[in-house]
Image (cartoon, rainbow, N blue to C red):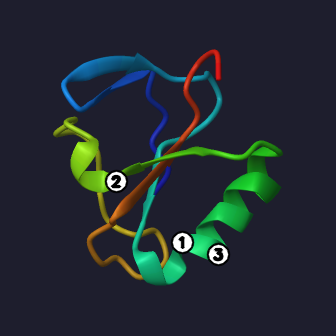
C-alpha cells in the first residue's frame, strides 16, 4: 500500500518527505523487486531505512507484495 505523507518520524527525528513520493515497506524477499518498481514508478531511487527505525504508528509496515511484516522502508526525503 502506498502512503503519501508530508513527514515521518525516523529514529525519533521528524523527517520531511518529498511531495509526490510514497512511503512503501517491503520484506527482504521482495526488496529487489520493490526497489525496481519504485525507480520505474517514480524515476528516482528511494532512500531506505530499516522498518523498525520508522516511529510513525500510522504507517502500514506490511510488504506490498506478500503482506508479511516489512523490514525495509522505501521513501524519498526532501532535499536528498
Rendered location of residue 46, percent (x, y): 63, 45
C-alpha separation, residue under disc 1 versus residue under disc 2: 12 Å
C-alpha separation, residue under disc 3 versus residue under disc 1: 5 Å
Which residue in the structure is indicated by mark 3?
Answer: 33
Which residue in the structure is indicated by mark 1?
Answer: 31
Rendered location of residue 8, percent (x, y): 34, 27
Side of 19 where 11 appears, left or right: left
Mark 1: give few (<14), some (14-19) or many (20+) Cα within 10 Å: some
- Asked whether the residues under the numbered discs 3 and 1 touch, taking CB atoms below 8 Å apart as contact, a structural biologist would say yes
Which residue in the structure is indicated by mark 2?
Answer: 50
- At horizontal 61% and vertical 22% (from top left) the residue drawn is 19
- At horizontal 26% and vertical 20% (from top left) the residue drawn is 13
Rendered location of residue 43, percent (x, y): 83, 45
- At horizontal 26% and vertical 71% (from top left) the residue drawn is 69
Res 78 → quadrant: top right
Mark 3: give few (<14), some (14-19) or many (20+) Cα within 10 Å: few
Amino acid at each position: 500500500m502506498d502512503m503519501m505523507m508530508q513527514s515521518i518520524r525516523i529514529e525519533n527525528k521528524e523527517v520531511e518527505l518529498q511531495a509526490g513520493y510514497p512511503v512503501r515497506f517491503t520484506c527482504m524477499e521482495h526488496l529487489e523487486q520493490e526497489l525496481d518498481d519504485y525507480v520505474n514508478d517514480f524515476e528516482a531511487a528511494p532512500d531506505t531505512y530499516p522498518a523498525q527505525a520508522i516511529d510513525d504508528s500510522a504507517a502500514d509496515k506490511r510488504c506490498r507484495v506478500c503482506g508479511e511484516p516489512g523490514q525495509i522502508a522505501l521513501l524519498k526525503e526532501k532535499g536528498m
